């Protein structure tokens, strides 16, 4: 059981870090506050309604045939608004030669995000069944316009819209999350967006996390993805992760991940490591 303790805010600093450790989450694949694959309704960082939180991250995922990297920064403002930026790159390694695009060809994209908390407080509303609910948007821009269009994508830039609900049950040490995402991103956007015959669809993300201690969290993510491209079927993704929070300023997440079939190269399984630092 995790007990609730109100932490005094430092009046002399906007970076008051008044929230409980681990309740800011880590950084998910699009660069927002959440878990590995899923966005959470929580606002990144540990700033209260009178403070600001900032997190920077780097994530690397080693798959059977590909390597994924992401770096970025997210800012939480007064536990109400989150702004984020992430740059992703996706190394095709030897698979690039098999796909005819060149060994080691690297796809990349930039993602700008904004999230707003609408109602609820996942930490302090322990006597309420109402979760914390947030809405958000990601603008995604792929850096390989000609190639992703040749692969069948309709656009080299697009947007995601989402709504997330997160509930923390401290006396059960649980974090529950569900997200509905309106997206046309192919492989998160690394292979462009949409196709000649399909566009935005509603996808789902769910996660279940357990706090073994206040600074050790384990969980599972599941995320559905669009299946737009004619040349290669896209499948759903899942991850099982363990996060350790050294402090509110530093955390590390390790996970096993299964992203399904990618670009006719078979099922892509592997692991990822993510470091997050903030104040």
Image (spheres, helix red, strand yellow):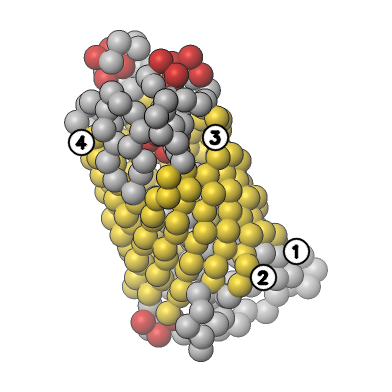
Secondary structure beneath dot 2 equals: loop
Residue 94 point in image, percent of width and height: 26, 18
Q: CA distance from mark 3 to mark 2?
A: 32 Å
- Mark 2 or mark 1, whichever is nearer to me: 2
Residue sitting at 19 percent across and 31 percent down?
266
Residue farthest right in this picture? 12
Q: CA distance from mark 4 to mark 3?
A: 26 Å
Quadrant assignment, res 97 = top left
Q: Are marks 3 and 1 in contact (CB under 8 Å)?
A: no
Q: Going from the N terminus, do you reach mark 2 or mark 1 first?
A: 1
Residue 241 visible from this viewpoint: no
Find disc 4 in the rendering and name its residue: 267
Q: Are marks 4 and 2 in contact (CB under 8 Å)?
A: no
Q: Nearer the viewer, residue 60 or 140?
A: 140
Residue 173 point in image, percent of width and height: 38, 77
Secondary structure beneath dot 1 equals: loop
Q: CA distance from mark 2 to mark 1?
A: 9 Å
Quadrant where the N terminus sits is bottom left
- Mark 4 or mark 3, whichever is nearer to me: 3
Q: Going from the N terminus, do you reach mark 4 or mark 3 first?
A: 3
Find disc 1 in the rendering and name its residue: 14
- Mark 3 or mark 2, whichever is nearer to me: 3
Q: Going from the N terminus, do you reach mark 3 or mark 1 first?
A: 1
Left or right of 92 on screen, residue 12: right
**Residue 147 sits above or below residue 53 on the image:** above
Q: Going from the N terminus, do you reach mark 4 or mark 2 first?
A: 2
Q: CA distance from mark 1 to mark 4?
A: 46 Å
Residue 198 point in image, percent of width and height: 41, 34
Find disc 3 in the rendering and name its residue: 158
- Mark 4 or mark 2, whichever is nearer to me: 4
Secondary structure beneath dot 4 equals: strand
Find disc 2 in the rendering and name its residue: 48
């Amino acid at each position: 059981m995790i007990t609730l303790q109100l932490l005094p805010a430092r009046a002399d600093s906007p970076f008051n870090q008044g929230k409980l450790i681990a309740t800011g989450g880590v950084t998910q694949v699009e660069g927002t506050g959440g878990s590995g694959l899923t966005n959470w309704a929580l606002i990144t960082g540990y700033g209260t309604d009178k403070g600001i939180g900032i997190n920077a991250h780097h994530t690397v995922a080693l798959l059977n045939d590909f390597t994924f990297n992401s770096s970025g920064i997210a800012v939480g403002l007064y536990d109400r608004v989150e702004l984020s930026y992430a740059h992703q790159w996706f190394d095709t390694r030897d698979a690039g030669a098999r796909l005819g695009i060149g060994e080691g060809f690297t796809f990349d994209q930039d993602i700008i995000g904004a999230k707003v908390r609408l109602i609820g407080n996942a930490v302090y509303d322990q006597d309420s069944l109402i979760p914390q609910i947030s809405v958000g948007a990601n603008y995604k821009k792929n850096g390989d316009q000609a190639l992703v269009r040749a692969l069948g994508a309709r656009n080299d830039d697009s947007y995601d819209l989402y709504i997330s609900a997160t509930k923390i049950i401290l006396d059960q040490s649980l974090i529950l999350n569900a997200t509905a995402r309106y997206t046309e991103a192919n492989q998160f956007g690394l292979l462009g967006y949409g196709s000649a015959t399909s566009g935005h669809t509603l996808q789902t993300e769910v996660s279940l996390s357990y706090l073994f201690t206040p600074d050790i969290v384990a969980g599972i993510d599941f995320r559905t993805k669009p299946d737009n491209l004619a040349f290669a079927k896209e499948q759903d993704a899942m991850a099982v992760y363990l996060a350790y929070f050294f402090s509110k300023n530093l955390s590390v997440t390790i996970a096993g991940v299964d992203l399904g079939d990618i670009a006719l190269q078979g099922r892509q399984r592997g692991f990822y490591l993510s470091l997050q630092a903030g104040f």
